[in-house]
Image (tube, helix red, strand yellow):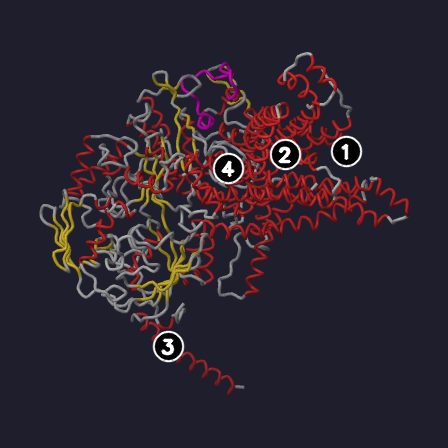
């Protein structure tokens, strides 16, 4: 087991390198680099001399391989360069945005887990009843509902029509307001985005938990426990659920890229200044250093997520064959 | 939901969606279905289909149906159920809520929402279908190559698959779409197709591995079959059912991705009816236009649901069916 | 009972009596400028840098106008007013310009201002290593400083932009040793000095007691970073800021709301920015003026401005802005007329093939239109054009490109039609966009070439007699209308609201009340109405 893990971690490094290479190549093919660098706008196209000067300053004349290596070396020193737009160090904008996305995703994941695990288990216990059937169908439909449509509908209903929740942003109070007031305001602004981000993973996790627990209930281990006289409730919540936690943990790894992708929509719709929105805007502005940094970070997080999931699985149940599981989860 | 019911419901929804997609020009169009011009009957709504030149109305000028309806109302014999085109702007009728003339309301340029929702079906299914085909082809190719090759090539290809899986789909699709030299529907299909092949590749590689060990494969290899032939004649047909299941899921995801990208403004060209772009417009209105949010969301939801139901129904059905060597 | 009522009555009279003098006092105060209070203005983002030499974004330029001075500036009617230069002489042949600088001006750190600073600014700007934009100085042959208070400029040839180009901030020579990093808090000679600049928060300016025109009345200027326009407007309503753009959707209801009108004063002005369609004349389609005119006739610009832009745009008839010198108000924009457009296309040889698109010489009338990403209004406009042209049997493929990619294509002239915009200056000279030679017409991406236009443009540039110049420009506008090298679209109308407590605020022809000089330096808040007292 540990041998496999060690091999996985070591094997991650070439993947990491590959990520940086792919990202770099991706940005090479984006047209209009010099224009972005020149802060050009219509009616103010830069002169040929300006463009030449920019090419020299940013080493665009050098062969891509050389630029890639230079960028990579800077990356190792965690020197992500400066944003082309506002000349702030990328690490600054990145950390400010990363923290907001982190809060959003953490809250969503927590909400999803807190609701999905008990719900799924409860329904596994009541499998077949009309309530459970209706609930499962509802979850199924919820899972299929597109995230940006849901976000718009919720925003429309709860913020515009009913006015219960704020429309967008992270906070409306000025810096002079009280700390508690600002915390509450932040929390109020968090509700809608978290709801939108969470419902999809909630539905998926709940259904997954339900089927895992059902499977667990049918396993030999539980049958034996039942034969020993353990009550149904205990069987459900202590034994079957514990078994279901393992596959649920592996799902976490797969959920991270989904959440990060979903963040783009939620953050754009709710003007939440996180990494998703930063990524999209930087791409539109051709702010290469930021796009590169964000892509690498996102891929890194995904990689870390799947490694973490593997680790959890291993520690939870050493008998599980990770190789076999890998291909099941990839689709 | 029982798998049979899922399958049936999925099939029904999918059929309905396909039907609407194929018949969209006949369901919503500003050109009438049947008209009488110059003493002869003609069928101008059919002109949207290739090879329908015979249906054109006799006239030296191309008929602008919007003004022709007003000047020659007697010429219109039969109108489509929705007598508006998806791109027909009418600034006087902008942002009207659902009413008698426009059943689902109008958008900010006065275009009929029902017509745009109907024409969203061919766009979604075309982009979704073609993108899935692309990712399927790519995935099977690379996965098969990986599974059937020597260790070192397999290792590199697996690395590539893992690499692609590390990028969140939307992020990759956005970058690819931005890089397109001639942005349009083709580049959108390519962007979506190129991001989603790794799942299929991984699956097929595992399948190839699994089937390599089967005895009849050894027999086939002994009789001289090369790796390409093995993939084509043995591995592929035996994995068909799960491949189709994945394809069905894929179409749903691809449709979602197309709508999402159109919503962000980087999908279909402006003016083309896509549910995502209607939703994008809805978001921009400060005066809330609920009809711009609800109806395209429903259409999108039902289409994705159809794909998911089909896939899951088929999955359950395949799980129960026995598997064995074929062909 | 009666006694109580009488008492109440007496009390009421007393109170009323007391109020009278107070109101009169307030009226009297309103006439007398007093120092105090501050103006809080939202800005959409942190300026990338506060280096006045290289900055190009609107917020940096806004701050620059208060912290530093230029030689001359723009007054309320777009006329040139003196600033650091108290007077100037332009020679008869237009080749020599002498500025006479004010004496006794000091930089914020106490060092005296001299002509050497002007010389230094010029040299740094034209130095390619500095990264500054130097196009405006291209006609200058040489700049000299014969003495501390005189600057002599010699031009290669006469130009109407002789004064216009000197509306740039003057930089301190003594602080910018070559290669040294500019100071974090820029130093200028301006009416306000930089107090602090907090990233992502605010920029605070404090009134300069020693300013040569006198200390401005408002103690502080605060530029607060509020990224979203919706939030900016909210901040105005809650009183957190004093100034905001009014969203187009809110304009009608707010301007009719008495409560709003009492609290705020509103200003409307067409911005110096023109949206246009550019038709590349190197394509087989757009070389013919009739085709270009048909394109303009096919677009319902008026309807679009009214319905989609909610009235927040003025339809343009040419590249001339209503506030610019020489604008011909009698020239009306072309109407929306599909029939005439169709006739013009027929005349130009593009005839409808049965049931299909228009054709000429075997070629279909189908072209690609480039628009840039991120602006929903441009997308809607493009969709409208596509729909209108489809009724004329012309097909349009809309291609959305992001900014840098689009500009790249413009630069390489690789496009058929484009939807774009110009930033205009107070001077109307459209040579850059209309002249056929690459040197004089660098922004003429569409390749418009008319010998008559070339001649008129050069005439207008070098004429010093205003009446003659006006006539030349009238003829240029008429030619633009006839030939439609571009389809001019809109000047966006900016609408802003300012807290009503600020007095002596004058509106300007084509700019916000913040723009003209000395403009905001004269604003004050009467003592009774002052809201923000003390340092920020």
Residue B2: assigned label: 1
Q: Estimate the spatial distance between the alpha carbons at disc 4 and disc 1, rounded to whole Å.
A: 38 Å
Residue C22: assigned label: 3
Q: Chain of mark 4?
A: B
Q: Mark 2 highlights which residue?
A: B304
Residue B174: assigned label: 4
Q: Chain of mark 1?
A: B
Residue C25: assigned label: none
Q: Nearer the viewer, mark 3 or mark 1?
A: 1
| Residue B180 belongs to the span the image colors magenta | no
Q: Which residues are magenta?
A: B48-70
- The x and y percentages for residue A74 are 45, 45
- Of residues A312 and C352, the one nearer the viewer is A312
Sequence-first tag of 4 and 1: 1
Q: Are marks 3 and 1 in contact (CB under 8 Å)?
A: no
Report the residue that reaches farthest toward the front: A3
Q: Nearer the viewer, mark 4 or mark 3?
A: 4
Sequence-first tag of 2 and 1: 1
Name the residue located 77 percent from the left edge and 40 percent from the top edge: A133
> In the displayed structure, does residue C147 sit left or right of residue B289?
left
């Amino acid at each position: 087991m540990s041998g496999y893990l060690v091999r996985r971690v070591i094997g991650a490094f070439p993947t990491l390198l590959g990520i940086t290479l792919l990202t770099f190549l991706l940005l090479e093919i984006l047209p209009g680099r010099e224009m972005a660098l020149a802060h050009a706008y219509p009616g103010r196209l830069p002169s040929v001399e300006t463009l030449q000067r920019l090419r020299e300053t940013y080493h665009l004349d050098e062969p891509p391989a050389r630029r890639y290596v230079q960028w990579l070396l800077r990356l190792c020193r965690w020197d992500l360069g400066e944003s082309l737009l506002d000349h702030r160090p990328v690490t600054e904008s990145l950390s400010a945005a990363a923290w907001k996305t982190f809060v959003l995703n953490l809250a969503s994941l927590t909400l999803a887990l807190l609701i999905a695990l008990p719900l799924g288990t409860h329904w596994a216990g009541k499998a077949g009843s009309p309530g459970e059937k209706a609930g499962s169908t509802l979850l199924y439909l919820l899972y299929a509902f597109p995230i940006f449509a849901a976000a718009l509908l919720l925003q429309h209903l709860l913020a515009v029509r009913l006015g219960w929740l704020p429309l967008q942003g992270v906070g409306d109070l000025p810096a002079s307001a009280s700390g508690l007031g600002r915390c509450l305001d932040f929390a109020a602004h968090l509700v809608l985005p978290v709801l939108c981000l969470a419902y999809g993973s909630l539905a998926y996790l709940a259904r997954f938990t339900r089927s895992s627990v059902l499977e667990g209930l049918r396993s030999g281990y539980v049958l034996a426990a039942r034969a020993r006289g353990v009550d149904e409730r205990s069987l459900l919540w202590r034994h079957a659920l514990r078994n279901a936690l393992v596959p649920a943990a592996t799902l976490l790894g797969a959920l991270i890229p989904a959440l990060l992708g979903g963040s783009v929509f939620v953050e754009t719709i709710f003007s939440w200044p996180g990494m998703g929105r930063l990524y999209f805007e930087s791409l539109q502005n051709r702010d290469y250093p930021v796009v590169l940094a964000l892509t690498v970070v996102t891929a890194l997080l995904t990689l870390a997520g799947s490694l973490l999931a593997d680790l959890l699985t291993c520690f939870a149940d050493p008998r599980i064959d990770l190789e076999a599981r890998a291909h099941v989860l990839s689709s | 939901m029982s798998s049979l019911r899922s399958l049936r419901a999925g099939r029904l929804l999918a059929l309905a969606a396909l039907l609407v997609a194929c018949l969209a020009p006949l369901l919503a169009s500003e050109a009438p279905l049947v008209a009488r011009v110059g003493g002869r009957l003609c069928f101008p709504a059919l002109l949207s289909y290739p090879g329908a030149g015979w249906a054109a109305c006799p006239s030296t000028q191309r008929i602008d149906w919007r003004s022709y309806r007003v000047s020659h109302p007697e010429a219109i014999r039969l109108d489509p159920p929705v007598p508006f085109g998806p791109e027909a702007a009418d600034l006087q009728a902008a942002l009207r809520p659902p009413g008698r003339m426009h059943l689902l309301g109008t958008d900010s340029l006065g275009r009929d929402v029902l017509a745009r929702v109907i024409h969203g079906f061919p766009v979604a299914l075309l982009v979704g279908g073609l993108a899935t085909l692309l990712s399927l082809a790519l995935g099977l190719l690379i996965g098969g190559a990986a599974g059937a090759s020597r260790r070192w090539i397999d290792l590199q290809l697996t690395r590539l698959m893992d690499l692609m899986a590390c990028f969140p789909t939307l992020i990759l699709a956005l970058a690819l779409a931005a890089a397109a030299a001639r942005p349009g529907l083709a580049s959108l299909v390519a962007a979506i197709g190129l991001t989603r092949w790794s799942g299929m590749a991984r699956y097929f590689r595992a399948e190839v591995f699994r089937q390599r060990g089967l005895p009849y494969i050894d027999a086939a290899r002994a009789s001289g079959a090369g790796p390409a032939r093995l993939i084509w004649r043995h591995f592929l047909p035996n994995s068909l059912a799960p491949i189709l299941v994945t394809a069905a899921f894929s179409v749903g995801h691809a449709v979602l991705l197309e709508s999402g990208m159109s919503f962000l403004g980087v999908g279909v060209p402006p003016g083309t009816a896509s549910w995502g772009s209607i939703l994008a417009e809805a978001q921009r209105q400060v005066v809330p236009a609920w009809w711009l949010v609800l109806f395209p969301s429903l259409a999108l939801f039902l289409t994705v649901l159809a794909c998911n139901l089909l896939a899951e129904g088929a999955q359950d059905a395949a799980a129960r069916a026995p598997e064995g060597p074929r062909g | 009972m009666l006694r109580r009522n009488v008492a109440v009555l007496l009390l009421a009279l007393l109170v009323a009596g007391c109020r009278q003098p107070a109101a009169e006092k307030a009226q009297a105060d309103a006439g007398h400028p007093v120092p105090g209070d501050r103006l809080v203005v939202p800005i959409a983002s942190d300026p990338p840098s506060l280096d006045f030499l290289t900055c190009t974004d609107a917020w940096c330029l806004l701050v620059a106008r208060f912290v530093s001075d230029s030689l001359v500036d723009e007054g309320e009617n777009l006329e040139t007013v003196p600033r650091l230069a108290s007077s100037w002489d332009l020679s008869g042949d237009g080749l020599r310009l002498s500025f006479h600088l004010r004496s006794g001006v000091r930089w914020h750190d106490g060092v005296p201002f001299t002509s050497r600073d002007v010389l230094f600014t010029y040299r740094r700007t034209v130095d390619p290593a500095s990264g500054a934009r130097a196009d405006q100085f291209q006609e200058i042959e040489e700049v000299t400083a014969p003495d501390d208070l005189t600057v002599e400029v010699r031009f290669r040839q006469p130009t109407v932009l002789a004064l216009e180009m000197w509306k740039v901030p003057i930089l301190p020579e003594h602080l910018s040793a070559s290669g040294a990093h500019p100071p974090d808090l820029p130093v200028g000679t301006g009416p306000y000095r930089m107090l602090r600049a907090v990233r992502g928060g605010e920029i605070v300016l404090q009134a300069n007691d020693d300013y040569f025109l006198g200390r401005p009345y408002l103690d502080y200027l605060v530029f607060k970073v509020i990224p979203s326009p919706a939030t900016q407007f909210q901040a105005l309503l809650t009183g957190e800021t004093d100034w905001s753009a009014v969203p187009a959707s809110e304009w009608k209801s707010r301007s009719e709301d008495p409560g709003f009108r009492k609290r705020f004063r509103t200003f409307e002005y067409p911005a110096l920015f023109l949206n246009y369609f550019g038709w590349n004349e190197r394509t087989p389609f757009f070389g013919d003026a009739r085709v270009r005119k048909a394109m303009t006739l096919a677009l319902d610009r008026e309807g679009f401005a009214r319905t989609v832009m909610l009235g927040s745009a003025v339809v343009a008839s040419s590249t001339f802005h209503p506030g610019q010198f020489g604008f011909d108000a009698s020239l009306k924009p072309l109407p929306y007329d599909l029939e005439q457009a169709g006739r013009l296309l027929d005349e130009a040889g593009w005839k409808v093939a049965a049931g299909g698109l228009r054709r000429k010489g075997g070629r279909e009338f189908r072209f690609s239109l480039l628009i840039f990403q991120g602006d929903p209004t441009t997308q809607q406009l493009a969709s409208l054009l596509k729909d209108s042209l489809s009724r004329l049997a012309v097909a349009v493929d809309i291609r959305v490109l992001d900014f840098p990619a689009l500009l790249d294509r413009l630069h390489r002239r690789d496009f058929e039609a484009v939807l774009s915009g110009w930033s205009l200056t107070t001077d109307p000279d459209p040579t850059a966009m209309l002249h056929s030679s690459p040197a004089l017409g660098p922004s003429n991406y569409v390749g418009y070439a008319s010998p008559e236009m070339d001649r008129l443009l050069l005439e207008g540039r070098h004429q010093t007699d205003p009446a003659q110049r006006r006539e030349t420009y009238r003829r240029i506008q008429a030619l633009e209308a006839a030939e439609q090298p571009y389809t001019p679209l809109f000047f966006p109308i900016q609408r802003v609201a300012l807290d009503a407590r600020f007095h002596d605020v004058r509106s300007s022809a084509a700019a916000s009340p913040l723009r003209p000089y000395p403009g905001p330096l004269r604003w004050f808040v009467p003592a009774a109405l002052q809201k923000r007292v003390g340092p920020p």
